[in-house]
Amino acid sequence: MTLSAPVRGQPSPLRAMIDFYLTMMRTAIQTQFQYRAATYMYLLGMVAEPVIYLVVWTTIARTHGGQVAGITAGGFAAYYIVWTLVRNVNIVFTPYGWEWRIREGQLSGQLLRPLHPIHYDIAEFAGGKVIWVLLYLPIAIGLTLVFKPTFDLTPLGLVVFFPAIVGAYLIRTMNLWLLGMVTFWTTRGSAIFETYIMAELLLSGRLVPLQLMPGWVQAIANWLPFKWTFFFPIEVLVGHPSSASLLIGLGMQVFWTAVGAGLVWLLWRASVRHYTAVGN
Amino acid sequence: MPRALTVAWLYVRIGAMNELQYRANFIVALFQALLALAVALVVLSLVYAHTTELNGWTEPQLLCLLGIQILMGGIINAVIQPNMERLMEEIGDGKLDHAITKPEDAQLLVSVRELRIWRTIDIITGAIVIGVGLTQLHRGLSPGDWLAFALLLVLGGVMLYCFLLILTTGAFWVVRMGFLPDLFEGVYQTGRWPIGIYPDWLRYSLTFLVPIGFAITVPAEALTARLQGNTVLLAIGFAIVLVTVSRWFWRRGLRRYSGASA
């Protein structure tokens, strides 16, 4: 696949960047496809988390006249099935990976490349996700048959869902990169990472739809990045947010991605100076 | 047999001493345990903010169940899983030679070589949670209840060990098994709730395919006056089956092993 006709002289930086992203993603797709069996097992383990929440809340809904906080059993099923899709997309390189990257000197090679290493991570994971999502579809069908969700999709929701999951992916990439870079200074980064995951569980809608949380938690969640990586993209598809709240949501995603990218840029410059590696 | 136990005990002590060198890890492990407990308690309070009973289980009863799940998780992560991970690696790269050439039972040896002593914090945390749950229950336990609870807890541990050994032994045939810890970790979280809430197909899977129901819900039944005599007999019978099958499967696997120098 050639994207561009031969360009005389220097290709434009934008075109070069697009070319780079497409090539990296294509390679990642092929690599990930080789490990489809292992990926499948990984996906099955991942699906356990939402299935448990789903069973617990539908059990409660059934004993309380069919709904909890306005959400029906079918509504919970829809929420957690879309949850799995959003989770698939927002999995990114973790701080544990960073530990390995730094300890094993993997970073040394990456530092020699002309582009900022974050581009490699974004492109590689984005490519891998094409395979993950494809492999996930049969699981989604299975979950749909078993738990009978009530979907009420709108064309607008479907259109906005795509940028919303991309936004979720980018925010989490930035946040986990920041947490990962902590590993340059300490080997105990995992404690900070797990604190982040705890905050995410409670404030993002990962654990329960935010409507089930007390009002003050929902208020806090509005002002933090977590909500825009789980609850917002899920609600785009299963709730009926107004056009205004869709715009606000996408705006918040752009805002938090920009904040994260700015911090990554600052912290990276400081971190690289701190980095030493043993040659191999 | 006593000699085998002495050897096993020696291995456990070496494992403990290895880990005791890294004191700072204790703080990290403690912090992680408390964080996980905090999340679990928040989930419980969320659930019981919207209902008074979950499939017949009250909040203190579910607290007992949660304690058992944490305690059993501590046993898995401190003793069983580290040994299984090492076994899997060694089957892959041929280092298993070192274990099977020793003049002791190989299954025993591969099951006691690692001990992550800091993960035993979860055993203590779990015991404390069970204690808190029991005091909130306001129900005196008879010696019979305690005995049944202890017996079922041990049986549950044995069943989980056999289950994980069978899975790991699969590495003699299938090379890429690295996904197992993640997969099991995910499935183990189902034990946090009484298995009665799951749909039939899942409930049976979590009883006879992955013995999480036997290991967690059944001991919790002993504490909450739900236990039936039949369940105890079934647990004993199933444990015997699993011990026999895992032993047989381990031997078959071992016969397939060809070692590093072959």
Image (cartoon, coloured by chain):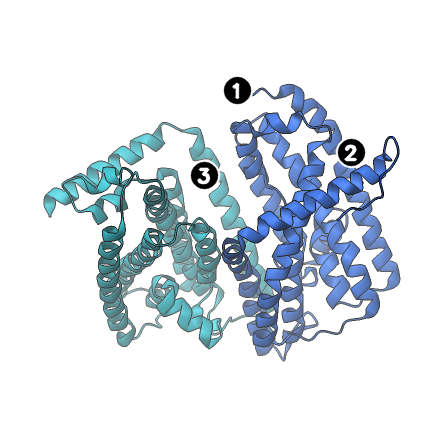
Chain colours: A blue, B cyan
Category of crowding for the residue at label 1, using alpha-carbon neighbours closer than 10 angstroms: few (below 14), some (14–19), many (at least 20):
few
Q: Nearer the viewer, mark 3 or mark 2?
A: 2
Looking at the image, residue B92 sits to the left or right of residue A91; the answer is left
User: Circle 2 sits on which residue?
Assistant: A262
Q: Vertically, is B157 above or below A155?
A: above
Q: Nearer the viewer, residue B154 or A161?
A: A161
Q: Vertically, is A272 above or below A201?
A: above
Q: Nearer the viewer, mark 3 or mark 1?
A: 1
Q: Amino acid at mark 1?
A: Val
Category of crowding for the residue at label 2, using alpha-carbon neighbours closer than 10 angstroms: few (below 14), some (14–19), many (at least 20):
few
Res. A56 image quadrant: bottom right
User: Circle 1 sits on which residue?
Assistant: A278
Residue B159 in sight here: yes
User: Circle 3 sits on which residue?
Assistant: B29
Q: Amino acid at mark 3?
A: Ala
Res. B6 image quadrant: top left
Mark 3 belongs to chain: B
Q: Are marks 2 and 1 on the same chain?
A: yes
Q: Nearer the viewer, residue B38 or A182?
A: A182
Q: Vertically, is A78 above or below B96?
A: below
Outermost residue, bottom side: A65
Looking at the image, residue A31 sits to the left or right of residue A269; the answer is left
Q: Give the mark, 2 or 1, whose residue is nearer the N terminus.
A: 2
Label drawn at residue B253: none
Q: Position of residue A140 (x, y in %)?
A: 61, 67
Looking at the image, residue B129 sits to the left or right of residue B39; the answer is left
Q: Position of residue B250 (x, y in %)?
A: 25, 55
Q: Position of residue B85 (x, y in %)?
A: 37, 45
- Element type at mark 3: helix
Q: CA distance from mark 2 to mark 1?
A: 30 Å
Q: Nearer the viewer, residue A86 or A49?
A: A86
